[in-house]
């Protein structure tokens, strides 16, 4: 018996077709190329963000409106100074450890699009300057006013999906960078503090790195030191 071609039921809508073209196509191509051309591995860790919350409140009292991501960037920069091998690119079989820390920040755009513009020379800025620079990047990303250098000169990327229920994930490398930090959900969890069990805001961190350039032990040391930098975070 030959089956008749199926047709939409009366009143049913047809499937929507979304071609992988334009920016969406470029994103898809770049993600596929990243996975195909590198040896990606992800370490995960839990981290108490209480100190960031306290620092954010103290800055607010001074009239400085910082987000938790702004403070996290500060901790990342301090940790990259101790672990410069993670602030690097891998091109043409050469690992280039960068002299400046250019932090790329993944930004979701309408239409399920994604960009990761860069705070250039973020390590040379004050906290207030970085806060202003990140806000400026977000605004210009939404209006398609980013420069080529801002889109290509990053040395380390942060992808923050902390407003979702996702605690850990495997961020894909922003090639040719050798590392990317995924920031997941933070929620109250049991945590040992001074030998006592307390409820603390614990967030998940996921560090994807290129195993061709960085081995597991130094990547683990970076993530450990980053957690400590966050948990001991203070503002001047």
Image (cartoon, helix red, strand yellow):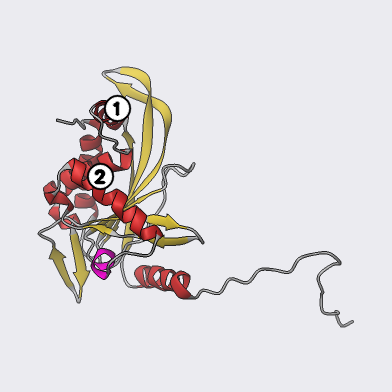
For the N terminus, which image quadrant? bottom right
State left or right for residue 29 relative to residue 39.
right
Q: Is residue 188 above or below residue 12?
A: above
Region in magenta: 148-152
**Is residue 220 at least partly visible in the picture?**
no
Residue 72 can be seen in this image: yes
Judge whether residue 226 is colored magenta.
no
Q: Nearer the viewer, residue 11 or 5?
A: 11
The picture quadrant where one finds residue 235 is: top left
- What secondary structure is found at the residue carrying circle 1? helix
Decide: few, some or many residues near mark 2? Use Cα within 10 Å; few <14, some 14-19, many ≥20. many
Residue picked out by circle 2: 131
Residue found farthest to the top: 196
Q: Position of residue 193 (x, y in %)?
A: 29, 21
As measured in the structure, the alpha-carbon distance from the residue carrying label 1 to the one carrying label 2 is 15 Å
Quarter the C terminus occupies: top left
Residue at 26% over, 58% down = 118
Q: Position of residue 14 (x, y in %)?
A: 73, 69
Q: Secondary structure at mark 2?
A: helix
Label disc, if present, on residue 57 of the rendered structure: 1
Crowding near the residue tagged with mark 1, few <14, some 14–19, many ≥20 C-alpha atoms within 10 Å: some
The residue sitting at 27% across, 29% down in the picture is 51
Q: Position of residue 11 (x, y in %)?
A: 83, 64
**Which mark sits nearer the N-terminus, 1 or 2?**
1
Q: Could you say which is closer to the camera, residue 204 or residue 16?
A: 16
State the residue in front, 4 or 113: 113
Horizontal and vertical percent position of residue 66: 29, 37
**Above-or-below relation of 226 to 12:** above
Q: On residue 114, which mark appears?
A: none
Residue occupying the point 82% across, 74% down: 7
């Amino acid at each position: 018996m030959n089956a008749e071609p199926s047709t939409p039921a009366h009143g049913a809508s047809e499937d929507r077709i979304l071609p992988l073209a334009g920016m969406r196509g470029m994103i898809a191509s770049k993600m596929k190329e990243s996975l195909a051309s590198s040896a990606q591995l992800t370490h995960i860790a839990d981290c108490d963000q209480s100190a960031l919350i306290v620092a954010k409140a103290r800055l607010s009292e001074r009239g400085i409106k910082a987000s938790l991501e702004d403070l996290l960037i500060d901790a990342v920069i301090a940790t990259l100074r101790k672990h410069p091998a993670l602030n690097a690119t891998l091109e043409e079989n050469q690992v280039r450890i960068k002299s400046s820390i250019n932090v790329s920040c993944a930004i979701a755009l309408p239409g399920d699009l994604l960009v990761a513009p860069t705070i250039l020379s973020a390590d040379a800025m004050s906290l207030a300057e970085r806060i202003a620079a990140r806000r400026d990047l977000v605004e210009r990303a939404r209006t398609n006013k980013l420069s080529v250098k801002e889109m290509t000169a990053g040395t380390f990327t942060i992808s923050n999906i902390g407003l979702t229920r996702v605690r850990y994930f495997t961020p894909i490398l922003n090639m040719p960078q050798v590392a990317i930090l995924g920031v997941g959900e933070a929620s109250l969890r049991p945590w040992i503090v001074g030998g006592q069990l307390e409820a603390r805001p614990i967030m998940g961190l996921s560090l994807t790195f290129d195993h061709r350039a960085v081995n597991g032990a130094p990547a683990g040391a970076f993530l450990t030191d980053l957690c400590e930098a966050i948990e001991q975070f203070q503002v001047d």
